[in-house]
Image (cartoon, rainbow, N blue to C red):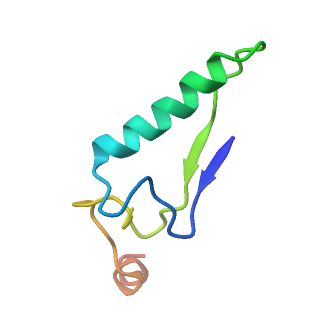
Amino acid sequence: SVLNGGGSNPAEDATPEMWADMIDGFQESAMDTRLGIPVIYGTDAVHGHNNVVGATVFPHNVGLGAA
């Protein structure tokens, strides 16, 4: 499994397509191994995914107010 967090991204100003290509590469590499066990990919994006250009980001206080 892979957990993305802490500001890691495939490139500066990464597009959604770049993210998909990166994860597809992980999956292809995993499936090419002897056991062929697929990758589980997760991301730490509690307030929105601010590492993806154009993604929605939810400020912490808005989330608290909505709760």
Q: Residue furthest left?
A: 54
Q: Is residue 18 above or below residue 35?
A: below
Q: If the image is split into quadrants, where does the N terminus sit?
A: top right
Residue 39 rendering spot, x and y as whole percentages: 63, 31
**To which quarter of the image does residue 31 belong?**
top right
**To which quarter of the image does residue 20 belong?**
top left
Q: If the image is split into quadrants, where does the C terminus sit?
A: bottom left
Residue 40 located left or right of residue 37: left
Depth check, front residue: 25 or 46: 25
Q: Residue at x 39, y 35 (%)?
A: 21
Q: Residue furthest right?
A: 35
Q: Residue at x 72, y 17 (%)?
A: 33
Q: Is residue 65 above or below residue 54?
A: below
Q: Residue at x 57, y 70 (%)?
A: 6
Q: Is residue 65 above or below residue 17?
A: below
Q: Residue at x 62, y 36 (%)?
A: 40
Q: Is residue 30 above or below residue 53?
A: above
Residue 24 rendering spot, x and y as whole percentages: 47, 30
How many numbered discs, if any? 0
**To which quarter of the image does residue 32 belong?**
top right
Residue 16 rendering spot, x and y as whole percentages: 30, 47
Q: Residue furthest front?
A: 11
